[in-house]
Image (cartoon, grey):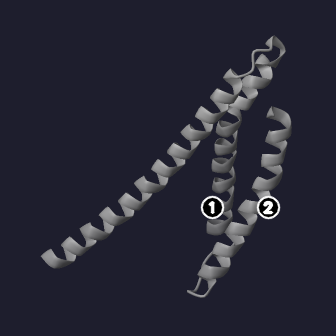
């Protein structure tokens, strides 16, 4: 039992570590985009560009927020609409989720870019 518990603990730690790495990468890329946007906005001195500058600064956050919402919608599709019933279904469901996420994010990103930039 101790060996099994040790192996389970190792697996839980590995999964938690991967989740922390994913969150860290997401947060770091968002912060990097905010720094780049802030430096681009700071370079503009024209008074009329203030509102556009704020929208440009918020653009990376809007993309991240939209991605989270689209991800939740696609996760709902994978768990409730196109569910996995057998092992061969796993690949099909993952591909559907990947394509659906890309198809949904493309117009959302275009809309946000047109509206905010």
Q: Residue at x 74, y 68 (%)?
A: 99
Q: Residue at x 43, y 55 (%)?
A: 21
| Residue closer to the observer: 94 or 18 | 18
Mark 1 Cα-neighbour bin, 10 Å: few <14, some 14–19, many ≥20: some
> In screen coordinates, is 65 left or right of 108?
left
Q: Secondary structure at mark 1?
A: helix
Q: Earlier in the sequence, mark 1 or mark 2?
A: 1
| Up-down relation of residue 35 to residue 6 (above or below) | above
| Residue closer to the observer: 114 or 86 | 114
Query: In the image, residue 68 lies at what x, y percent?
Result: 63, 49
Quarter where residue 12 is shown: bottom left
Q: Which residue is mark 2?
A: 103
> In screen coordinates, is 100 left or right of 2?
right
| Up-down relation of residue 63 to residue 35 (above or below) | below
Q: Secondary structure at mark 2?
A: helix
Residue 1 showing in the rendered view: no
Query: In the image, residue 100 lies at what x, y percent?
Result: 75, 65
Q: Which residue is mark 1?
A: 75
């Amino acid at each position: 039992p101790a060996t099994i518990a040790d192996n389970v603990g190792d697996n839980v730690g590995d999964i938690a570590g991967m989740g922390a790495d994913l969150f860290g990468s997401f947060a770091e890329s968002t912060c990097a985009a905010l720094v780049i946007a802030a430096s681009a906005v700071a370079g503009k001195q024209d008074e009329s560009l203030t509102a556009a500058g704020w929208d440009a600064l918020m653009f990376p956050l809007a993309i991240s927020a939209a991605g989270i919402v689209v991800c939740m919608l696609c996760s709902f599709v994978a768990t409730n609409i196109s569910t996995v019933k057998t092992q061969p279904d796993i690949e099909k469901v993952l591909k559907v989720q990947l394509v659906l996420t890309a198809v949904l994010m493309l117009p959302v990103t275009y809309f946000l870019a047109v509206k905010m930039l």
